[in-house]
Image: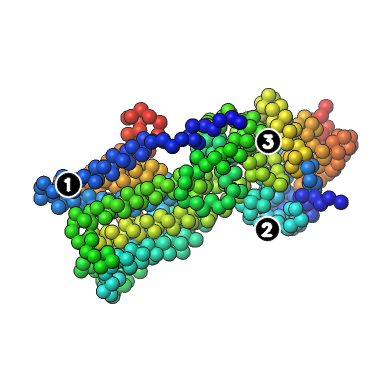
Amino acid sequence: MTEPVLRLQSLRKRFGGLVVTDDVDLEVMPGELHAVIGPNGAGKTTLIHQISGTLTPDSGRILFAGDDITHLPVHARAAGGIARSFQITSVLPEFSVLENVALAVQARDGSSFRFFGVAEREGGLNEPAMEALEEVGLAERAAMRAAHLSHGERRTLELAIALAMKPKLLLLDEPMAGTSAQETERLIAVLQRLKGRLPILLIEHDMTAVFALADRISVLIYGRILASGSPDAVRADPQVVAAYLGDSME
Amino acid sequence: MTPLPAAARAPRLSTADAIALAIFAILAVIPLVTRFGAESYLLSLVTRIMIFAIAAVSLDFIVGYGALVSFGHAAFVGLGAYAVGILAFHGLNDATLALPAAILLSALFAFVTGIVCQRTKGVYFIMITLAFSQMAFFIASSLSLYGGDDGMTIRARNTVAGFDLMGSDGALYYVVFLFLAGAYLLCRAFVASRFGRVLRGARQNPARMATMGYEVFRYQLAAYVISGALAGVAGFLLANATAFVSPAYMAWQRSGELIIMVMLGGIGTLYGAIVGTATFLLTEEWLSGLTEQWKMIFGPFLILVVLFARGGLAGLTARLLGRRHD
């Protein structure tokens, strides 16, 4: 049997009296796109934060490629191969689009304690960065400052940054949030191409995107996994329809 | 493959480089001009400007590119100076010993205090660097063997491997000039390097840098140590130029002045720190000659610069030249 890339074991997190992650077990298999859906406030982003290391769970374990990473800091998890995008777009606004991505390449390309040589002109960093930009269709924006990109383009840039890290697991926190219908379509196409090449944990509100992309869907409500299974099974689950999908599907 | 953008391919001479070249050209010829008059006063004034410019450049390196506003930078200058003074007091008068000692002492102080300071952000960082520099100030004041509050005079300038290379004011001028050029070029290289790019990235978005796999703390601490060590070099030169060390070198007012010098010239440009230091010290020199209440004029002047010349003199020049600031 293949090992899951990511395994959450009875994860629990509370903020004061509010339980935001309530005994969550979840797996992402190699090559799988596992989507987590749920209403606002269900604890989806909190879950991503715990996997990426921004938050530490109160109890439970996080296993990544078989290793317990529950207490590793953010940068160590990233260096270990977990890349993420943010719900609220997070790029380096003053850098060019290319430099944003080149910096991600630099992170996995030997030491950054190099004090001489102009980083901006290192072909060994720029070329893989350019490839990542081409992959997401943002290559012609390479020289532009990240601050000047449109919202949808910035979301795409986040994806390119994550890809340039050559991650072993990709965490996407609502990549379609706030994008236009046209941009959403483009992002879905990009993710469709990535799908299968690396395991992805996708959190998304856009149901069209989720049902188009996911191999497996888990429904998170009040910090609990209500149901988990294939898109068809989840769509048909009466509990899920009653609690969440009811209003958004019909 | 889509071709790489121009900036990623060819080196170019930027406006900043051109201005820096002009500054160093002017500084290089000043002693030649002053030879025709009894201008040793001017020579020692510009020497002093260049020494503080080294400290200001080192400060701009962390303020402008790392957003680490150190309000205790004078402590490093003072430590560098005390390294020279204390060694000289014990009869050790050579730069091959005094310079490494100055660098080591200030770097060590930066490393130890930096570990604590780097845990804080923003205003807290400012306050804690201030607190550490005040600590250094009071320790220096209590060293009664080395003059305590009053400081101590140094009998002679450092020799260099036994040779009296810094004996004359003209020679000292060029030694300081070379150190300033070196500090500027070093910082400029560091900023553009892989290391500098991580530092600049962390200034914009540390959370993003962490999720790329960078342990931001290590880079910021390293930058802080580099900056402190460079300021220590300035202290080494200051002790040699003035033949005197005193706790006053570490006073918080000196730290504040360094921040003003950097702001005046334009944060995050490096050459701006040199321009700012020159403007600050020359204005101070000129105004204090006019009236005893010169600070009454100097204060409003600084406020005007902050209000109307955003980006300091460097920003103003760039706007006057009608170019985008780069």
The mark lying in front, picked from 3 and 1, is 1
> Label 3 belongs to which residue?
A175
Label at residue A71? 2
**x and y, in percent, of residue B96 in the image:** 32, 66
The mark lying in front, picked from 1 and 2, is 1
> Label 1 belongs to which residue?
B32
Task: Evaluate whether residue B296 shows in this view.
Answer: no
Q: Is mark 2 on a helix, strand or loop?
A: loop
| Mark 1 neighbour density, 10 Å: few (under 14) some (14–19) many (20 or more) | few
Question: In the rendered view, would you say B99 is above or below B297?
Answer: below
Residue at left 68%, top 48%? A82
Task: Evaluate whether residue B190 shows in this view.
Answer: yes
Residue at left 15%, top 47%? B34
Q: What residue type is labelled 3?
A: Pro
Question: Are discs 3 and 1 both within one chain?
Answer: no
Real-space Cα separation, disc 1 to disc 2, in angstroms:
64 Å
| Mark 2 neighbour density, 10 Å: few (under 14) some (14–19) many (20 or more) | some
**x and y, in percent, of residue B105 in the image:** 38, 65
Answer left or right for B169 relative to B121.
Answer: left
- Quadrant showing the C terminus of chain A: top right
Q: Is mark 1 on a helix, strand or loop?
A: helix
Which residue lies most toward the top here? A182
Nearer to us in this view, B265 or B323: B323
**x and y, in percent, of residue B22 in the image:** 28, 39
Residue at left 10%, top 50%? B38
